[in-house]
Image: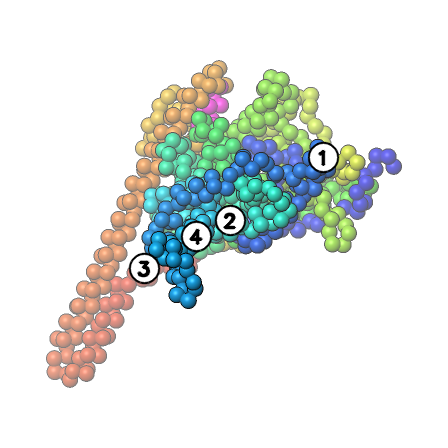
């Protein structure tokens, strides 16, 4: 009894219920600041509060701070924001407001002031009459004081919001047309939140003033700014994520971001089932896209920050663009790291294609259940302990993979299908690097994690529902990637992936179980540790992977993911060719090896770095050799794509013009024929024949006439 869990005994799995799980944050030991390879958690819309609501929240926050402060004896008689009057003079704040240009705008200021004239019936001293002095001074000064008070809040808002607005204004003038809807949305969002903030400042000060009599106005203002800033922190953080890309682009310092965005854009084009060089205006591409319903499409914004690699799918926010978080510490090695962004790209697809996430969850869950029922999945343990309960292991596996579906799908359908074996090398080396950063690679015996966490949430029925955190532990993640390599025809590379995983976790540390702990538990109250046999996870991995990439999906127009994108032996041949060039310091792309996509280049960058390290070169020297060559190759691919786009668009325009001209010629020819044949007929009959001739001409020269667009299935994806 001493070691039994203190949480409610009955824990339910709720298999198939994923709505809450997909939007939760990434708390607990599974997530680290620099390995957030998962979707962001932006809301569907920015729920801006009105000024009154924001003020109420800010003052409620203040009351909590005040109560906490008063529990400390040394501050029992003093409010937390009480400061000396000399510290924050009110006239100093007004002085800032004077700098606001609109205070002195003649159309806004003096013309709007209505100065009352003295009424003749009111008595006035002779002295004031002689000196022409009345109360105008006080009226004018009072009016200016009010105007300056208004400007004070505008100045504070300017300090907070102008930087965001400046970046958006610059992007509106300088960024391509396809980004403009997102830019306009950002501008609208910023305008709304600025107005709410300005309106909330005086209201919050009024509330603080009533609770802090005698405290200076300056102190009250600082307190109000602090409280409102805390309330708006989450919203401002999201706005910063979306506006920083414009600022970093304007600075001209972060050209590496162009490579990141180009890579994910090309991955997106490949997912659309077309050659990236084929403009999206072409008829066949447009028809193909009708098989998928995109929420946002191919619009990506990337910034360097202290977060990531991570993504915020655009379908989870009002902006209309996918946001990519690129860690600053990857800036100098971006070409080597870009295979990881194929994983991030897949998160955006997972959330952007209507119904894809839910359908994949159902497909994987059913595949595991069917395999177990048919005897294809034989487990080492048919039941698993869950505290005092025993649950069917197959149900626990279904629940685990349903909760981790986004990450598993991103590894397989993103990382592996777009960069092949290179993704396994990159993932294993990156995880090992992150896990050893504090102690050093030679002081860290275990380079891959073998545990993760789960959360417990009480349901309305009083039961406790379990949800696994979204990331699979590193070690078993390697075996999922290996299963994907097996599935697409790279068995040798798959086996090496497993061997390297064993090496990374430590030959003497290979676990028997993968464990999950209650991330919200305390010493006094926590859920039970969940232990699933490693062997069972290894056995189920191929079933999960095959279901993910081979199952025809309604959300994809009735085709499977591998029919749209796939890493084939032909892809690997091109990757190997580029790898050899990079390892020998050669950057020119071949022109006689078929299409070279950016996916081939980024995979080659990883393989070249790995190969140079394996050849005995110092890792820093290897990176310095690969990175400039990789960036140069990416730029060459982009130049080729842009040239092909331009040619294709010009050809389409010429064809359209020719079709239009042919249609006019047919109309003219039809009219002339009518004139000749109907010379003896009356005018009404002649008019009828002209109209008929015109119809015939249009029908013969119409755009796309006779083309069969009944088939919407994209060609098998050997495009790489």
Could you say which is closer to the camera, residue 205 or residue 160?
205
* CA distance for labels 3 and 2: 54 Å
Closer to the chain start, of discs 4 and 3, is 4
Callout 3 secondary element: loop
Q: Which residue is mark 2?
A: 197
Give the residues in magenta.
Answer: 603-613
* CA distance for labels 2 and 1: 32 Å
Closer to the chain start, of discs 2 and 1, is 1
* CA distance for labels 4 and 3: 78 Å
Callout 2 secondary element: helix
Task: Specify few, some or many for label 2: CA neighbours under 10 Å numbering under 14, 14-19, or 20 or more.
Answer: many
Q: Which residue is mark 1?
A: 72
Task: Specify few, some or many for label 1: CA neighbours under 10 Å numbering under 14, 14-19, or 20 or more.
Answer: few
Task: Specify few, some or many for label 3: CA neighbours under 10 Å numbering under 14, 14-19, or 20 or more.
Answer: few
Residue 605 on the magenta span: yes
* CA distance for labels 1 and 4: 46 Å
Closer to the chain start, of discs 4 and 2, is 4
Residue 479 visible somewhere in the drawing: no
**Nearer to us: label 4 or label 3:** 4
- Judged left or right of residue 292, residue 679 is left
Residue name at image x 51 percent, y 39 percent:
89
The reply to whether callout 3 and callout 2 are in contact (CB within 8 Å) is no
* CA distance for labels 4 and 2: 31 Å
**Nearer to us: label 1 or label 4:** 4
Q: Is residue 275 above or below residue 139?
A: above
Q: Which residue is mark 3?
A: 704
């Amino acid at each position: 009894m001493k070691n039994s869990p203190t949480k409610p005994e009955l824990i339910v799995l709720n298999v198939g219920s994923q709505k809450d799980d997909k939007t939760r944050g990434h708390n607990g030991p599974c997530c680290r600041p620099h390995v957030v390879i998962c979707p962001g958690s932006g809301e569907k819309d920015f729920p801006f509060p009105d000024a009154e609501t924001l003020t109420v929240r800010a003052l409620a926050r203040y009351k909590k701070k005040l109560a906490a402060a008063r529990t400390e004896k040394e501050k029992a008689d003093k409010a937390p924001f009480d400061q000396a009057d000399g510290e924050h003079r009110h006239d100093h704040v007004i002085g800032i407001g004077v700098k606001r240009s609109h205070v002195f705008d003649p159309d806004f200021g003096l013309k709007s002031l209505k100065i009352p004239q003295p009424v003749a019936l009111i008595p006035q001293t002779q002295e004031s009459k002689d000196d022409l002095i009345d109360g105008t001074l006080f009226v004018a000064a009072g009016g200016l004081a009010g105007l300056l008070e208004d400007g004070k809040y505008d100045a504070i808002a300017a300090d907070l919001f102008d930087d965001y607005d400046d970046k958006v204004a610059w992007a509106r003038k300088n960024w391509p047309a396809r980004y403009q809807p997102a830019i306009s949305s950002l501008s609208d969002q910023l305008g709304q939140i600025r107005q709410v903030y300005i309106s909330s400042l005086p209201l919050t000060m009024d509330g603080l003033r009533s609770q802090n009599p005698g405290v200076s106005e300056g102190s009250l203002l600082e307190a109000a700014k602090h409280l409102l800033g805390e309330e708006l922190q989450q919203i401002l953080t999201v706005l910063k994520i979306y506006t920083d890309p414009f600022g970093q682009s304007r600075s001209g310092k972060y050209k590496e971001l162009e490579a990141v965005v180009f890579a994910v854009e090309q991955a997106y084009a490949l997912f659309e089932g077309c050659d990236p060089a084929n403009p999206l205006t072409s008829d066949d591409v447009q028809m193909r896209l009708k098989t998928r319903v995109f929420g946002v499409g191919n619009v990506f914004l990337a910034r360097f920050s202290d977060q990531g690699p991570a993504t915020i799918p655009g379908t989870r926010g009002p902006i209309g663009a996918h946001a990519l978080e690129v860690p600053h510490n990857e800036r100098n090695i971006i070409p080597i790291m870009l295979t990881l962004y194929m994983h991030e790209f897949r998160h955006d697809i997972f959330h952007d294609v209507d119904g894809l996430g839910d359908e994949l969850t159902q497909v994987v869950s059913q595949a595991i259940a069917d395999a177990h029922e048919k005897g294809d999945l034989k487990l080492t343990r048919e039941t698993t302990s869950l505290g005092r309960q025993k649950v069917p292991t197959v149900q626990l596996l279904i629940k685990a993979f349903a909760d981790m579906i986004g990450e598993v799908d991103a590894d397989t359908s993103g990382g592996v299908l777009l960069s092949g074996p290179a993704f396994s090398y990159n993932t294993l080396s990156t995880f090992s690097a992150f896990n050893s950063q504090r102690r050093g690679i030679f002081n860290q015996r275990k380079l891959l994690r073998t545990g993760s966490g789960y959360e417990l949430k009480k349901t309305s029925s009083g039961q406790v529902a379990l949800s696994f955190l979204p990331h699979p532990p590193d070690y078993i993640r390697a075996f999922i990637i290996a299963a994907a390599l097996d599935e697409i025809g790279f068995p040798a590379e798959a086996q090496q992936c497993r061997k390297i995983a064993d090496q990374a976790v430590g030959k003497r540390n290979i676990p028997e179980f993968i464990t999950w702990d209650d991330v919200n538990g305390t010493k006094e109250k926590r859920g039970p540790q969940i232990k699933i046999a490693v062997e069972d996870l290894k056995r189920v991995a191929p079933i999960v992977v095959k279901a993910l990439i081979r199952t025809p999906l309604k959300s994809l127009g009735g085709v499977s993911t591998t029919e749209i994108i796939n890493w084939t032996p032909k892809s690997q041949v091109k990757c190997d060719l580029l790898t050899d060039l990079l390892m020998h310091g050669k950057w020119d792309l071949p022109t006689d090896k078929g299409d070279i996509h950016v996916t081939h280049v980024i995979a080659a960058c990883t393989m070249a770095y790995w190969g140079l390290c394996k050849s005995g070169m110092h890792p820093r020297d290897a990176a310095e050799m690969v990175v400039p060559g990789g960036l140069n190759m990416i730029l060459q691919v982009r130049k080729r794509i842009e040239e092909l786009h331009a040619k294709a668009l010009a050809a389409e325009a010429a064809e359209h013009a020719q079709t239009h001209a042919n249609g006019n010629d047919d109309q003219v020819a039809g009219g002339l024929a009518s004139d000749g044949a109907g010379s003896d007929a009356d005018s009404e009959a002649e008019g009828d024949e002209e109209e008929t001739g015109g119809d015939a001409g249009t029908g013969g020269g119409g755009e796309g006439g006779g083309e069969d667009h009944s088939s919407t299935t994209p060609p098998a994806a050997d495009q790489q």
